[in-house]
Image: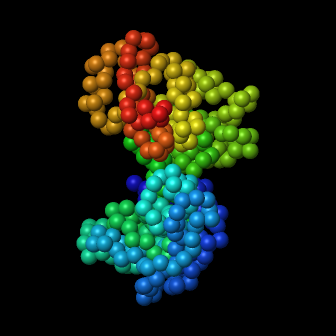
């Protein structure tokens, strides 16, 4: 799915400004051997590792043993390493994880070796250019399950593939699975210039949808428009009225979906806006939107419900879980009660 969309989009997503240690990893990896001509695989490698949690001072640039790929894994020689906000969650201990730990969740590079049971149907071979989402990417080499690896199309550079993969696939999940966006849909995207928000604006434009994007300052307005937002609102007191803008753009009908790429800081406000945006009261039920039978059961149990809206919120719980399949039922009646689910309770705990 990603390989079909990536070449057609504007790659505004880019690798962050890396700290010096990670620059060293990237440069060192390229110096070991030219791309597509694999040198003998070493026994030791450079990596960024943490042995305890804390600030950036806990990052250790050191030599560690090269990972040995398991039967279903590929050994990948990293060329570009993505730096994502989630990495700080592991570094600070917000997300508990065994130590020592090599940070990093995505990278691109070339296949250095294959495990003995990597399915032939995946058609991987040494020297293939690939991108992956996994663990332990802040290193010269990473062992990654083959099912989490994708070949990079010839029309896409390794740099663009790495910069786009994690955030791009998150955005694709929202518009294809959380709510199947149709051409002509009006969609509200919060934080439209963020990593996921920027991808959402681009993909929504490619799908023919209309996007209302919120930003936090005047300096981000043009960026959001360049990304694909049709209408941009500065979501700050005295600078923009999101609700009024939504009603004006949609002739009072409201948006088809709200995509919140921020999470806890904007989650409650976004929920409160649903009733005003759609003119109906929201009730919550954590259901996979693809489970039509489960949705029908809720309608049968609560006849006052007359429509639904798909609300995708990232990192809504304190424990950081990503709940992409949240469905919100709407009703013009106040005589309906759909209980909160555990993830919602966790948010309030």
- Give percent across and percent down for residue 231: 63, 35
**Position above or below: 346 against 278:** below
In the image, residue 150 sits, relative to residue 339, either above or below, namely below
* Quadrant holding the N terminus: bottom left
Q: Going by the image, does 57 lie left or right of 263?
A: right
At horizontal 27% and vertical 25% (from top left) the residue drawn is 297
Position above or below: 8 against 256: below
Tag count in the figure? 0
> Colour mode?
rainbow
Q: Give the percent coordinates (x, y) of residue 68.
A: 36, 77
Give residue 293's quadrant in the image: top left
x, y percent for residue 267 = 53, 34
Q: In this view, does 131 lie to the left or right of 291?
A: right
Residue lying farthest to the bottom in this orientation: 40
Q: Residue 188 in the image: x percent, y percent?
A: 55, 34
Q: Which of the two residues, 208 or 229, is positioned nearer the viewer here?
A: 229
What residue appears at the point 43 percent right and 32 percent down from the top-left corner?
345
* Residue positioned 59% across, 62% down in the render: 15
Q: Which residue lies furthest to the front in this view?
A: 52
Quarter holding residue 118:
bottom left
Q: Is residue 6 visible?
A: no
Residue at 54 percent of width and 38 percent of height:
264
Is residue 68 in view? yes
Instruction: Identify whether 265 is placed above or below 7.
Output: above
Taking depth in this image into account, of 169 and 86 the one nearest to the observer is 86
């Amino acid at each position: 799915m990603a390989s079909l969309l990536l070449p057609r989009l504007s790659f505004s997503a880019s690798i962050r400004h890396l700290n010096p240690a990670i620059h060293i990893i990237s440069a060192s990896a390229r110096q070991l051997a030219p791309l597509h001509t694999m040198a003998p695989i070493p026994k030791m490698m450079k990596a960024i590792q943490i042995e305890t949690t804390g600030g950036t001072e806990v990052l250790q640039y050191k030599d560690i043993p090269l990972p040995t790929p398991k039967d279903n894994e590929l050994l990948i020689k990293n060329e570009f390493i993505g730096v994502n906000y989630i990495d700080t969650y592991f570094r600070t201990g917000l997300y508990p994880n065994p130590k020592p730990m090599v940070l990093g969740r995505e990278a691109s590079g070339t296949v250095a070796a294959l495990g003995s049971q990597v399915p032939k149907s995946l058609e991987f071979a040494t020297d293939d250019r690939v991108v992956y989402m996994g663990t332990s990417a802040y290193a010269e080499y990473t062992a990654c399950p083959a099912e989490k690896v994708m070949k990079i199309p010839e029309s896409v550079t390794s740099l663009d593939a790495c910069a786009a993969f994690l955030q791009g696939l998150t955005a694709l999940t929202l518009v294809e699975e959380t709510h199947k966006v149709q051409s002509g849909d009006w969609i509200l995207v919060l934080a439209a210039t963020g990593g996921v928000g920027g991808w959402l604006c681009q993909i929504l434009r490619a799908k023919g949808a209309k996007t209302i994007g919120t930003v936090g300052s005047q300096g981000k307005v043009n960026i959001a428009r360049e990304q694909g937002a049709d209408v941009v609102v500065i979501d700050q007191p005295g600078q923009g009225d999101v609700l009024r803008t939504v009603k004006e753009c949609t002739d009072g009908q409201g948006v088809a979906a709200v995509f919140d790429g921020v999470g806890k800081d904007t989650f409650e406000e976004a929920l409160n806006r649903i009733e005003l945006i759609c003119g109906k009261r929201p009730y919550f039920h954590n259901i996979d939107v693809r489970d039509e039978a489960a949705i029908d059961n809720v309608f049968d149990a609560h006849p006052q419900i007359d429509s639904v809206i798909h609300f995708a919120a990232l990192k809504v719980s304190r424990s950081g879980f990503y709940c992409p399949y949240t469905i919100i039922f709407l009703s013009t009646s106040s005589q309906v009660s759909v209980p909160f689910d555990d993830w919602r309770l966790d948010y309030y705990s």
